[in-house]
Amino acid sequence: MNLDVGLAALIVNYNSGAFATRCVESLIAEWTREGRARELLQVVVVDNASPEDQSEFLGQMEAMGAEVIRAEDNLGYAAGMNRCYARTRGGPRDVVAILNPDLFFVPGALHVLLDYVLEHPECGAVDPRACIDPLGVLNLPRNLLPTPTDQLRVTLAHMSPAFCRSYSRHRLEKAIPWWSAEGPIEADMLSGCCLFLRREVIDDLDVLMDERYPLYFEDTDLFRRLSKKGYKLIHHGGARVLHHWSRSAGIAGQFQGEPFRRFRVGQRAYFRRFYGALGAWYVGALSYLENKLWPKKWLFRPMHELVDLGAFAEPVEIELPRSCRFLLEGTIDPNWIVAVGILGEGKRWVCPPEAWEWFFDSSYFMRAIDIDTGEVLGAWQFSKTVPGRTWPLDLAELAGHGDRLFGGKAG
């Protein structure tokens, strides 16, 4: 274990103060638990002019030793990260962590990521396995590198169940090794929610993050630049973090308004940079085809025949037609383009109560796949409804669940 290494952790906050506070707490707690000197850990947080009052949380983070930058305007995610990085210090072999505010460090993850990136000079960036729930049941999906071909596949998958089934087979070929990995595997695309890089690698780049991306695609741009420099991108299944998915950018199923506008700006900027003006036109044309020309009633049609299980207040149960090693994919749309992965074995899956707690009160689609044969064993729809509870829940309460399930308040 490299105990003498310095770490600079960078966090951009936007209305996510409760989560950011827990993230900082868990990082400091894990750093201390491993016997590392506190002065070797630097945490820099920028608040991007959050419209909701964040003063309580920012003050708590400052009390823990974090440096907090209060921006007068919303800088955008990339510019916010760059401003954080500009405040850091350290030697070339020190490590920089790019963190979403809604992360929680699970015991044992930190040293795995630090040791790997330090001991493998060919590694440009490493990310951990990210799970929605503290038990590690609901594994977040693998991100596929955006290319013109992949963009066409996704568009056609939205428009046609047949194309959606074809795309799902392509996606699963990459997703299953990602979800089942217990150690490091090389990839062309990582998750931007938690990245560890050596400072010398960042110094080898022109800039940490390109500020032409206001939100989304700034991490993809970073991965492309790292690969161009000859560095490897590593996903480490032996390190796990809890990621309170979609709490920082918006409640799941509410990806619209300003986040969606910024996504489109970033998408056009990315395709223009790596595929030229024709690439930017191409992705715009696909968007126009899907959203303007294609009939709305033909979009996002289920690619499987669905069995309606009804509404649940208690954890859902899925009965399979036979016993096998299976993968369950859960999602909020019947295309399964973006889905969490659940690995299991047997003929039945019962969602653990600790994992059920992290399902939004919403409608869901789930399908089961035999890992050994690739056969789709069934597809279901259900909803989670808790009487007397409305969404959104109190964010401070949600942010504290990781502490409770890991045995008390972090730090």
Image (spheres, grey):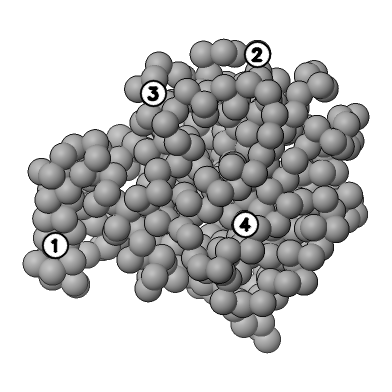
Tell which circle, 3 or 4, labels the residue nearer the N-terminal end. Answer: 4
Read off the residue under disc 4: 46
Q: Residue at x 70, y 57 (%)?
A: 68
Label 2, on which residue? 119
Query: Which amino acid type is shown beneath numbered disc 3?
Result: Ser
At numbered mark 2, what does the secondary structure look like: helix, strand or loop?
Answer: helix
Q: Would you say residue 234 is visible in this rendering?
A: no
Q: Is residue 345 above or below residue 319?
A: above
Q: Which residue is mark 3?
A: 227
User: Can you say whether 90 is above or below 257 in the image?
Assistant: above
- Between disc 3 and disc 4, the foreground one is 4
Which corner quadrant of the image does residue 381 belong to?
bottom left
> Residue at left 70%, top 20%?
115
Q: State the CA–CA distance, disc 1 to disc 4.
A: 36 Å
Quadrant of the image containing the N terminus: top right
Q: Which residue is mark 1?
A: 288
How many numbered discs sit on the rendered protein?
4
